[in-house]
Amino acid sequence: MARSALLLAGLMAGAGAAHFVAPKQFDAIVPRVLPGNPRAWTQASGVVELALAAGLAVPATRRTSARATALFLASVFPANVQMAYDWRHRPTAARSIAYARLPLQVPLILWAWKAARKEG
């Protein structure tokens, strides 16, 4: 199970780093109903993803971090919905990417939840 949790940690670390390396793509999908600057939300979510990755990598914090990761992945689902809505008039390839993100969130959440259960 440690291998699966470490792979999830790598995914979260990569996603977190991407929020700082290429923030514009994340700014664009921040739901407009959220207050403040989209960049602040992008940076905050990047920090959270990096912290979750660190927690997943450490056996002593893995279970709690895996649960928090599942909750975080569920909480950012509205950004995927925003992207799908905003990209509805784009070319087919772009729309397909945006729409594919929606159901992809489910296995990611289940992966994190499974990692939490296995650590218990």
Image (cartoon, rainbow, N blue to C red):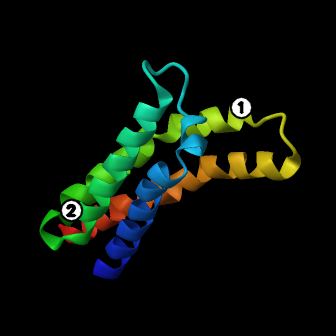
| Residue, disc 1 | 86
| Residue, disc 2 | 63
Picture coordinates of residue 67, whole percent (x, y) = 27, 53
Label 1 secondary element: helix
Residues under labels 2 and 1: Cα distance?
Answer: 35 Å
Q: Could you tell me if residue 38 is visible in this image?
A: yes
Q: Which mark is residue 61?
A: none
Q: Nearer the viewer, mark 2 or mark 1?
A: 1
Amino acid type, label 1: Asp
Disc nearer the start of the sequence (2/1): 2
Picture coordinates of residue 29, whole percent (x, y) = 58, 36
Name which residue lies at 43% across and 58% down: 17
Q: Residue farthest to the left?
A: 60
Q: Is residue 67 above or below residue 79?
A: below
Q: Is residue 32 left or right of residue 83?
A: left
Q: Residue farthest to the right?
A: 91
Quadrant, the C terminus:
bottom left
Label 2 secondary element: helix
Picture coordinates of residue 112, whole percent (x, y) = 37, 60
Q: Is residue 116 left or right of residue 15?
A: left
Amino acid type, label 2: Arg
Q: Is residue 58 above or below residue 43?
A: below
Quadrant, the N terminus:
bottom left
Discs 2, 1 touching: Cβ within 8 Å: no
Name which residue lies at 43% across and 43% down: 74
Q: Could you tell me if residue 1 is visible in this image?
A: no
